[in-house]
Image (cartoon, grey):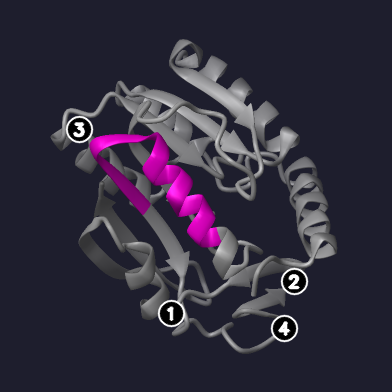
Amino acid sequence: MGSTDPDLAAIQRAHWQQTYREHPGMYGGRPSAPAVHAAAVFAAGGRGTVLELGAGHGRDTVFFAREGFTVRATDFSATGLEQLRAAAREQGVADRVTAIEHDVRTPLPLPDASVDGVFAHMLLCMALSTAQIHAAVAEVRRVLRPGGTFVYTVRHTGDAHHGSGTAHGDDIYEHGGFAVHFFSRELVEALAGGWHLDEVHAFEEGDLPRRLWRVTQTR
């Protein structure tokens, strides 16, 4: 599938905007477990600049900044980013955080080889086609410095919601207004082409529970 339906993309963007307006700080103030893992990986490599894709209202962004990283945080929700900036000010780390409104379907607004680590929690398994996911990972590779690490998480085809709900093709299924692209192991392996695949770690999150992989790969 070359691209997702543009109407689906627009609907998802509007849905996330409304969700952040109605539920400010919806994921709480504590960092996600994958972000804690990523911070340790980035710190071990002496990595000072982190790009976070799909940062939302910033719980992980603020955590990275508190850990001493300089963070460039992107999201396509202006509402989420407003909350992120406020959280950074409240936590006293605004000087280490730059928030950028950006849709991952388009090239990253950063120079080549300009960041040390990239983190994306659940961003790649949004309403993106396989082609768009490959393009996004190519952009991550472009902006990473040699030896830089990319840590991302995605829901996979072993998840209870895979194959149910409203089907949009290309392993994308919608539940409760949220569209998810469920990853196969083959897709993970394909995205690691030209990288060093360090780890594919299976874990669960939430009440369903959602079944995810945390993938760590190095340029």
Residue for badge 4: 167
Q: CA distance from mark 1 to mark 3?
A: 30 Å
Which of discs 1 and 3 lies nearer the camera? The answer is: 1
Comparing 26 with 128, the one in front is 128
Name the disc covering residue 43, or none: 3
Task: Give the residue drawn at x 65%, y 37%.
Answer: 102
Q: Are marks 1 and 2 in contact (CB under 8 Å)?
A: no
At label 1, counting other C-alpha atoms closer than 10 Å, the crowd grade (few under 14, some 14-19, many 20 or more) is some
Which circle's residue, 4 or 1, is located before the other in the chain? 4
Residue 34 % position (x, y)? 35, 52
Secondary structure under the numbered disc 2 in the rendered image:
loop
Residue 134 painted magenta: yes
Comparing 74 with 115, the one in front is 115
Comparing 140 with 87, the one in front is 140
| Vertical relation: 15 (above or below) 159 | above
Tell me how many marks there are. 4
Which circle's residue, 1 or 2, is located before the other in the chain? 2
Q: Which amino acid lies under the numbered mark 4 shown in the image of this protein?
A: Ala
Task: Give the residue drawn at x 62%, y 67%.
Answer: 129
Which of discs 1 and 2 lies nearer the camera? The answer is: 1
Task: Give the residue drawn at x 38%, y 64%.
Answer: 191
Q: Quadrant of residue 7?
A: bottom right
Q: CA distance from mark 4 to mark 2?
A: 13 Å
Q: Which amino acid lies under the numbered mark 3 shown in the image of this protein?
A: Ala
Q: CA distance from mark 1 to mark 2?
A: 22 Å
Q: CA distance from mark 4 to mark 1?
A: 16 Å
Q: Which amino acid lies under the numbered mark 2 shown in the image of this protein?
A: Gly
Residue 153 % position (x, y)? 41, 59
Residue for badge 2: 176
Residue for badge 1: 184
